[in-house]
Image (cartoon, rainbow, N blue to C red):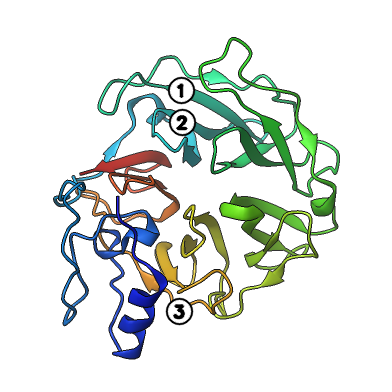
Amino acid sequence: MRRLTTPWLLLLASCGAHISNDPAALGADAGVPLDAAAPGVDAPATPPDAAPLGPWSTPATVTVAATTAVEDDVTLSSNALEMVYAITDANSGKKDLYYTSRTAIGAPWSTPPSKLPFDTAASEETPRFSVDDKTLYFASDRTTAGNLDIWAVSHTAGGTTPWGKAALLTPFNTDLTEKWLSPCSDGHYVIVQAASGGDSHLFEGKLGGAAPVAIDALNATTGSDTGAFLTPDCLTLYFASFRATPEKIFVAQRATVNAPWGMPAPVDTFKIPGGNGNQEDPWLSPDGRTFVFASDAAGTKDVYISTR
């Protein structure tokens, strides 16, 4: 697939073009083929090797993650065939991570989902795969009695022993609550951090580098930001925010990894019939054909999926 190069982005910016808040209209650098354009902007021709994409389907609950329990914190592998999500224990309030897979897009998810083998009596939540799917990052308070830190575990898709031993990432062993470490290329990442009792917000950094810095251009002045998902090219960020009521998913873009983030815009694409609940925990597949998120529109939080 041909990618939208930096000159295209700079051209659009110099012309004052508006970047749509609909994932269907984002460029190929956001992981989405260029089959739609923002108002007033001529879309580049669809590459001959890229099938045009239609509209998003009505979001539907993922069957294995649609129970009376609270299910959220969803993430998929890059091929959209493996899913990890959290279920909240009704008694302890702690979260556990569960795994399910499918053989092809559109095939049923394996049932019952399996609790991941590195589970503890503490909370495990907010998973994200590395770009190559070989590592799963997640948050846990297993050593800090309530303060979440980032852990990592190796992953072999389809292997006989697909999960390694979880290890604490020492740079994130701080007095802050750290969740949703979402990596992109070259070790760059966005993470959600919060001081004790404070709102959570978006920070970014590079693995092995200095402490992450706040993304002031995106963080809410009132209410928490959470659920960070960074596209593999590091140029598009989805997140959820309580700056809106109910909680909404937002999207922001930048021209290069070192460029400033543009103004975040709400994503209003995914309407759940008969529901107007909170939407959070966004994830978009690299080919732009699968979008998952969590919502309580049906009463309790469930995982929803939309395809095109």
Label of residue 262 in the image: 3
Cα separation between marks 2 and 3: 30 Å
* Residue 267: image location, x then y, percent: 33, 64
Please name the amino acid that badge 3 sits on: Gly
Q: Tell which of 252 and 51 is nearer to you.
A: 51
Locate residue 191: give its quadrant.
bottom right
Residue 72 makes an appearance in the image: yes
x then y, percent, for residue 134: 60, 32
Residue carrying label 2: 83
* Amino acid bearing label 2: Met
Q: Secondary structure at mark 3?
A: loop
Towards the viewer: 230 or 45: 45
Looking at the image, residue 152 lies above or below residue 219? above
Q: Residue 89: in sight, yes or no? A: no
Residue closest to the eye, 188 or 219:
188
Q: Quadrant of residue 67?
A: top left
The residue positioned 37% from the left and 54% from the top of the image is 31
What residue did someone put label 1 on?
Answer: 100
Whether residues under marks 2 and 1 lie with C-beta atoms below 8 angstroms apart, the answer is yes
User: Gap between marks 2 and 1, in whole Å?
Assistant: 5 Å
